[in-house]
Amino acid sequence: MENFRKESDLLGELNVPADAYYGVQTQRAIDNFKISGQLLSSYPDFIKGLAFVKKAAAKTNYELGLLDENLYFKIAEACDEIVAGKYHEQFPVDMIQGGAGTSINMNANEVIANIVLEKLGKNKGEYEFCSPNDHINLSQSTNDAYPTAIKMGLLHMNIGLVERLEKIVDAFRAKGNEFHDVIKMGRTQLQDAVPMTLGQEFEAYAATLEEDISKLNNNANLFVEVNMGATAIGTGLNAPVGYATLCAKNLAQITGFPVISAPNLVEATPDTGSYVIYSSATKRLAVKLSKICNDLRLLSSGPRAGLFEINLPPMQPGSSIMPGKVNPVIPEVVNQVCFKVFGNDLTVTFAAEAGQLQLNVMEPVLSHAIMENINFLCNALDTLREKCVVGITANKEICLNMVKHSIGIVTALNPYIGYKKSTEIAKEALETGNSVYNLVLEKGILSQEKLDEILDPKNMLKPHNK
């Protein structure tokens, strides 16, 4: 039978597993919030963010004479161990919870306190020597520590997302170089337009995703403004004079991020604008990524009755009934990830709007939605790059034949024979099945030498003079 220790809070006593570093308030959260199944332990960067905040708070309290040196060093040591990856299994609280994040804040307070007690040679739960509330949460409230930890976690998570985005940009750009001489037909509204190269198409994918690197970084930079020292509602009750500025300075030193104290802590405490704008950047990335995946599925469609301009790496059999069928499963799964991101962004919008008066109590679902988006996008970008993009090959002859037989190349004749005559040629070509090339020669509109020059696909890839 599992051993327990008894801990108490304002609601009374509760059994806590004897070997657990968390305490009574974490146990109540475990019992109360069986919601998503996604636990705080699944988000290591968030846990590190909590440890950064608690270390910065302890350092500030020590420097302001509120915490003795031995206890400060032990708290700092415990936080460093958590940042290094220890004790993460001791954060079993569901990410979606009531209480505006109090359960997560207390989870961190209790774990750090019990680690410190162990270092002091005391038993877990002997909080008279190191208290989750009186020492670890000193000069703080959930309402400043929790959102600050979210922001520190998101800053770290953004670094990982950008790294993966940079890698897939490089992969698309490499394909752009590889396909630089593959002539194909460009399309608008799924109809033939004008020639281009497959290389230009893939370089465009690289360029559009590359734009989002700066957007993500710029929006993440809003997270460096924090409300530590605000305590409950921004008035700073129970925090000493100078705490807010000094804590932000210490947090900047500990994390390496240019953290600053918000100029108005009463405004900053309920404000969730930075989450909204960062979430919009993840949605923007997902919109672009999904469009690219749509294109990859179209370009590889077939293989006999579709476009079949490119080949995607075959990943698995595509049907339980149709022999030989292989589906574009990697773009498909990335599409679905993007749909999830769209929904989570809407969740962020509703949660941000739901703030009332001096606090937004919906930050748990808001932060979870953004963190889930980052995790999903990181996995999707890696999967798309590793299992799809790097292995794409071109069907060069198919691409070229489509150009030769396309009505769309008549567009190149506009500057030479006029729009009206070009339209007549296009219409006749469609009705008779004859080629644009043959019709122009048969009608004596242009010489063969001039026509060959104009309709050489390579001459239609960039601006030129008549």
Image (cartoon, rainbow, N blue to C red):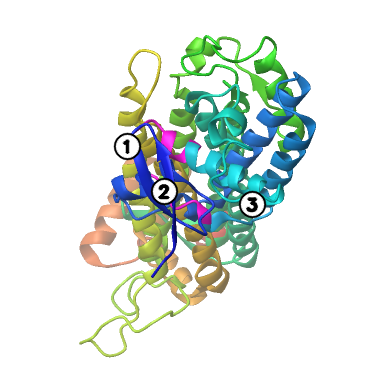
The residues bearing labels 2 and 1 have C-alpha atoms spaced at a distance of 20 Å
Q: Main secondary structure of the magenta part?
A: loop
Three-letter residue code for mark 1: Thr
- In reply to whether residue 96 is colored magenta, the answer given is yes
Decide: marks 2, 1 in contact (CB < 8 A)? no
The residues bearing labels 1 and 3 have C-alpha atoms spaced at a distance of 26 Å
Point 51% across, 32% down: residue: 146
The residues bearing labels 2 and 3 have C-alpha atoms spaced at a distance of 29 Å
Of pointers 1 and 3, the one earlier in the residue sequence: 3
Q: How far from the left and from the top, in percent, is residue 38?
A: 39, 54
The reply to whether residue 90 is in sight is yes
Note whether 279 is above or below 421 in the view shown. above
- Say what secondary structure mark 1 lies in: helix
**Res 347 label:** 1
Point 44% across, 80% down: residue: 314
Left or right of 411, for residue 428: left
The local crowd at label 1, few if under 14, some if 14 to 19, many if 20 or more residues have their Cα within 10 Å, is many
The local crowd at label 2, few if under 14, some if 14 to 19, many if 20 or more residues have their Cα within 10 Å, is many
The boundaries of the magenta stretch are 90-105
Three-letter residue code for mark 3: Glu
Q: Nearer the viewer, residue 413 or 12?
A: 12
Q: Nearer the viewer, residue 462 or 322?
A: 322
The reply to whether residue 300 is in sight is no
